[in-house]
Amino acid sequence: MNEEYDVIVLGTGLTECILSGIMSVNGKKVLHMDRNSYYGGESASITPLEDLYKRFNIPGSPPESMGRGRDWNVDLIPKFLMANGQLVKMLLYTEVTRYLDFKVTEGSFVYRGGKIYKVPSTESEALASSLMGLFEKRRFRKFLVCVANFDENDPRTFEGVDPKKTTMREVYKKFDLGQDVIDFTGHALALYRTDDYLDQPCQETINRIKLYSESLARYGKSPYLYPLYGLGELPQGFARLSAIYGGTYMLNKPIEEIVIENGKVIGVKSEGEVARCKQLICDPSYVPDRVTKVGLVIRVICMLNHPIKNTNDANSCQIIIPQNQVNRKSDIYVCMISSAHNVAAQGKYIAIVSTTVETGDPEREIKPALDLLEPIEQKFVSISDLFAPTDLGTESQIFISRTYDATTHFETTCDDIKDIYKRMMGSEFDFEEMKRKKNDIYGEQEQQ
């Protein structure tokens, strides 16, 4: 402990582990501590099932019908990876992929008028989909072709649209797309949680739809991937990367004080000893006085003994309930995985519902999603504060991650990682910086 480090990291959530991995690869001396006895912080996967019951204060032990407790790995925060998204890129560049196995999620569905429909994933599915009428399909196809050809560096691909000025509302109008198609394009393809994007320049939306299409093109069934044994595998993979490059890890370490001198962090005190550092990365729970509450998220983990109705018995899927289908401002999401991913006992399914809280009765807000899942064997409800840093770290050199939001993928988490990197290093994030060094002294001998 009584050493000098370049960077100390507190908390082993995904954001923290990726950053400690990048810093280690870049030759920085890193000490990574967590007050918990397990990896993952807020983004952990809980096993065995008995621990989940305890965590949610559910009396008694799980019934025998739930199978073996050890067969369960239950994510506290439900998310999938976009196959062509930033997190997959980070995994590939750092070669953390060698520690993980992924499966493609079997389908993405969207809710309309009380029913769920498959989000068309190919041109032929789009043409067969009952989400649109015949003429609408032609117009939608034209729109998708335009999006696919769009290149922000080549004005010839703009088709009369100015990506930095034309709003998305105007683009939809140009292609004469109706409200239902706009709904599923904005929420199930561009994955916006609200409708604020309609009056913003269209470049961001077009790029989001491109990300969806390119992710889909990689594997065909859906654009989403999910790691076997749960999302808790992700932070552990990046922790291994950091350790290979000399990073030091300590779990079960109570953090007594972040030591500040003249407004700048100089170390962390744990069990009476001080480890010194030049910079500190941590999640909001370690610095309650330097963060502000920006919202609430409700998540409900539901255990089922059946696949979700009308999903062709998929063993994994995502369902998006667009906000205006249920008179809300933000969408409701359902992520479903099962024993096929080694996260539940044989024949069991885990569906996790999440959304941004908008009223004083959050459980009532997610009723439309729970109705799709009935019958539910066991529910675990959590309502979590969303925090953002009030201190950007310029003076204090304390860099605080944001709480994981209600989105069902990791794009916003990766944006936060890039933002923290820029504030710490003073330069734009570059994926090349994450590449393993060919002649690294720690090598991979122990894994050959």
Image: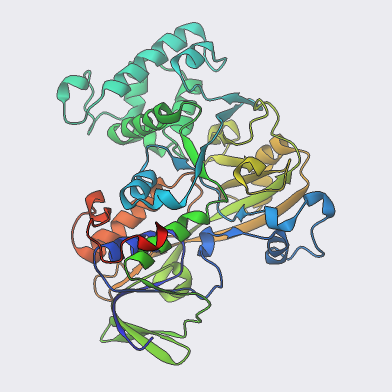
Name the side, left or right, on which 145 lies relative to 76: left
Of the 4 image quadrants, the one containing the N terminus is bottom left
Name the side, left or right, on which 430 lies relative to 415: left
Of the 4 image quadrants, the one containing the C terminus is bottom left
Q: Residue at x 78, y 46 (%)?
A: 377
Viewer can see residue 176: no
Q: Residue at x 61, y 35 (%)?
A: 326
Q: Residue furthest bottom?
A: 272
Q: In front: 132, or 313?
A: 313
Name the side, left or right, on which 339 lies relative to 375: left
Q: How many marks?
A: 0
Q: In front: 437, or 407?
A: 437
Viewer can see residue 355: yes
Residue 195, image x and y in percent?
A: 44, 36
Q: Quadrant of residue 286?
A: bottom left
Residue 403, image x and y in percent?
A: 46, 59
Q: In front: 55, or 328?
A: 55
Q: Quadrant of residue 341?
A: top right
Name the side, left or right, on which 188 lies relative to 300: left
Q: Residue at x 82, y 49 (%)?
A: 65
Q: Residue at x 33, y 71 (%)?
A: 246
Q: What colouring style does the render use?
A: rainbow
Q: Is residue 118 above or below residue 235?
A: above
Residue 233, image x and y in percent?
A: 51, 55
Q: Is residue 268 above or below residue 29?
A: below
Residue 431, image x and y in percent?
A: 26, 50
